[in-house]
Amino acid sequence: MSLYCAEGGPGVELSAREMGELLGEALAKLGSRNRVLAVPPDMTRFHSQAGQLTQAAWRCYGERMQAVLPATGTHAPMQPAQIAQMFGEVPQSLFHVHNWRTDVETLGEVPRAFVREQSEGKLDFAWPAQVNRLLIEGGFDLILSIGQVVPHEVIGMANYNKNILVGTGGRDGINRSHYLGAVYGMERIMGRADNPVRAVLNYASDHFLRELPIVYVLTVVGRGADGGLAVRGLFVGDDVECFHCAAELSLKVNFEIVAEPIRKAVVYLDPREFHSTWLGNKAVYRTRMALANCAELIILAPGVKEFGEDRTIDGLIRRHGYHGTAATLAAVEQDAELAAELGAAAHLIHGSSEGRFTITWCPGRLRREEIEGVGFRYGELDAMLQKYDPEKLVHGMNMVDGEEVFFIANPGLGLWAHASRLDTN
């Protein structure tokens, strides 16, 4: 087991050229590879720089890169224009679509007793290790799992084996892992590399992924001095050491402790990335530990047109809404369709304020009655954009009409918290 590249630090800023050179040097250490599969994230992780790295790998291997499988998980398939924008010159003929409901193979199960232990007795099911069958049947001698390590609401710190076991995973694996994280407690997990969900995935990696030639390519991306993005680290390896190195740096780069609980926060969602509340509720997940009791969270979402990424989940969100843990757990008991889609139940928990603060959604393409029907407040997008102009606000605290407003331009880049909410047991 090896770490082929570990380059980074809070003050490091890697250019695209430097990332390509570092990746090339790391891949050279692997020796000759003839059938390569790249597994990057989709457009919702555009800022991960995975698109640049996939292009660099393609330039390195040429025709030996046989396929690209975006790890979409439950997300909608990438469209040709998105592929072109994110992956540039990589031929679109190489791209495959992952269908999380039909395209998977179960490699084995994490035992029920292990899941019960990790959930502190709250859950009693085995966890199936599922991956897209292309990984098994493609005959690849190298699988490059590419992505960004950043604080995450389900898995504590995103990426590593989550990219494979969830990003290319199946319905049961995705649903149960998300539900485990939600029931255990999102605020006990976010920003922690070691947690019950990660323990389950690590068990699956150790027992069921060992025969797959997976090498992880992980970035850490932060905010640059000019307000843009800065790649702070690149880590390439074939085991958990690679992930831990990236996670340690990510906490230094992506975790922001606010001096005082925030009374009003405004979060902007880039319409190129965010088309649903399923994705856009990152605005809720990543800020909740920084928000004061009775705070107001305003979400500016010009691209949001739906709740779920597929019809089934969208319908369940509309049916049950974001009404907190107790209401969602009761709904799981009463609605067999929701019980069969535990990932949707987890999302309903994650997206609720539990009554502690208010959430005002300002979507470009959802009506007032739709937003209010799932338990959120509704705001008129044009009026809110005029008052809280993302082009004029700076990251952090701003004064708007004499009121302090904390502005975040991209919730996917970090995790915000106040010290009073960090010691959650």
Image: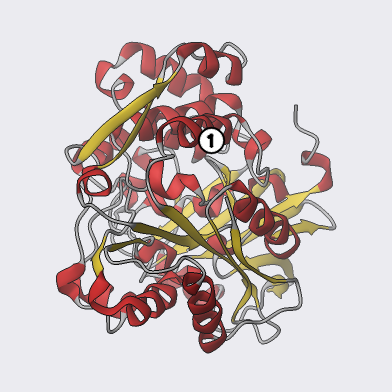
Q: Secondary structure at mark 1?
A: helix
Front-most of residues 157 and 403: 157
Quadrant for the C terminus in the image: top right
* Left or right: 23 as drawn, with respect to 275: right
* Left or right: 375 as drawn, with respect to 304: right
Residue 29 visible in the displayed image: yes
**Type of amino acid under label 1:** Asn
Q: Which quarter of the picture shows residue 149?
A: bottom right
Question: In the rendered image of this protein, does residue 98 appear above or below residue 40?
Answer: above
Question: In the rendered image of this protein, does residue 201 appear above or below residue 267?
Answer: above
Dot 1, how many residues are within 10 Å of its Cα: few (below 14), some (14-19), or many (20+)? many
Front-most of residues 8 and 349: 8
What is the basis of the colouring in this image?
A: secondary structure
Q: Residue at x 26, y 63 (%)?
A: 35
Residue 264 visible in the displayed image: no
- Give x and y (percent) for residue 394: 66, 78
* Count of number-bearing discs: 1
Q: Which residue is mark 1?
A: 202
Q: Residue furthest front?
A: 31
Q: Residue at x 33, y 40 (%)?
A: 169
* Left or right: 183 as drawn, with respect to 356: left
- Give x and y (percent) for residue 223: 65, 75
- Give x and y (percent) for residue 362: 43, 60
- Give x and y (percent) for residue 174: 37, 35
